[in-house]
Image (tube, rainbow, N blue to C red):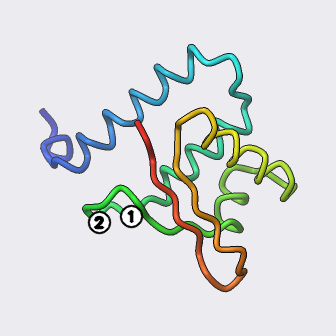
């Protein structure tokens, strides 16, 4: 086993990605924009925190996911919540980050 894979956080993240990809492959409702947004959320997830809830910046997520429209971003976020992939608590304040929780 490689040294990095022995880290419990790396193993947890690997299992979550595997779980998401398996579930997403069976979910016909997901579009490429949903997949890229979820991967952006996962990418910006802090590795050093123990809790599953963390803060995200819309601007960073949109850039990473290559989503150009705020309407598309909000539509994808609300559908990921509706489909049970994430929890999302928006702040509606451009100076404060929103809370996201990955639910897998």
Q: How far apart are the two marked residues, 1 and 2, measured between alpha carbons?
A: 6 Å
Which residue is drawn at the image coordinates 85% and 55% (left, top)? 68
Instruction: Give the label on residue 62, or none.
Output: none
Residue 26 against residue 96 in the figure, above or below: above
Q: Position of residue 74 (x, y in %)?
A: 77, 53
* Residue tagged 1: 46
- Label 1: state its secondary structure: loop
Q: Are marks 1 and 2 in contact (CB under 8 Å)?
A: yes
- Label 2: state its secondary structure: loop
Q: Quadrant of residue 104?
A: top left
Q: Position of residue 18 (x, y in %)?
A: 39, 28
Disc 2 crowd, CA 10 A, few/some/many (<14, 14-19, 20+): few
* Left or right relative to 101: residue 48: left
Pick the residue in front: 53 or 46.
Answer: 53
* Left or right relative to 3: residue 15: right
Which residue is drawn at the image coordinates 67% and 85% (left, top)? 95
Figure quadrant of the N terminus: top left
Residue 29 against residue 26 in the figure, above or below: below
Q: Position of residue 38 (x, y in %)?
A: 58, 44
* Left or right relative to 10: residue 33: right
Which residue is drawn at the image coordinates 48% and 50% (left, top)? 42
Q: Position of residue 67 (x, y in %)?
A: 79, 51
Pick the residue in front: 33 or 54.
Answer: 54
Disc 1 crowd, CA 10 A, few/some/many (<14, 14-19, 20+): some
Q: Quadrant of residue 70?
A: bottom right
Which residue is drawn at the image coordinates 69% and 27% (left, top)? 30
Q: How many marks?
A: 2
* Residue tagged 2: 49
């Amino acid at each position: 086993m490689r040294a990095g894979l022995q880290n419990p956080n790396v193993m947890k993240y690997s299992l979550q990605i595997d779980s998401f990809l398996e579930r997403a492959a069976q979910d016909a409702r997901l579009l490429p924009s949903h997949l890229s947004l979820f991967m952006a959320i996962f990418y910006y997830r802090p590795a050093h925190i123990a809790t599953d809830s963390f803060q995200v910046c819309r601007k960073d997520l949109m850039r990473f996911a290559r989503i150009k429209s705020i309407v598309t971003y909000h539509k994808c976020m609300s559908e990921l919540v509706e489909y049970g992939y994430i929890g999302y608590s928006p702040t509606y304040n451009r100076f404060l980050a929103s809370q996201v929780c990955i639910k897998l």
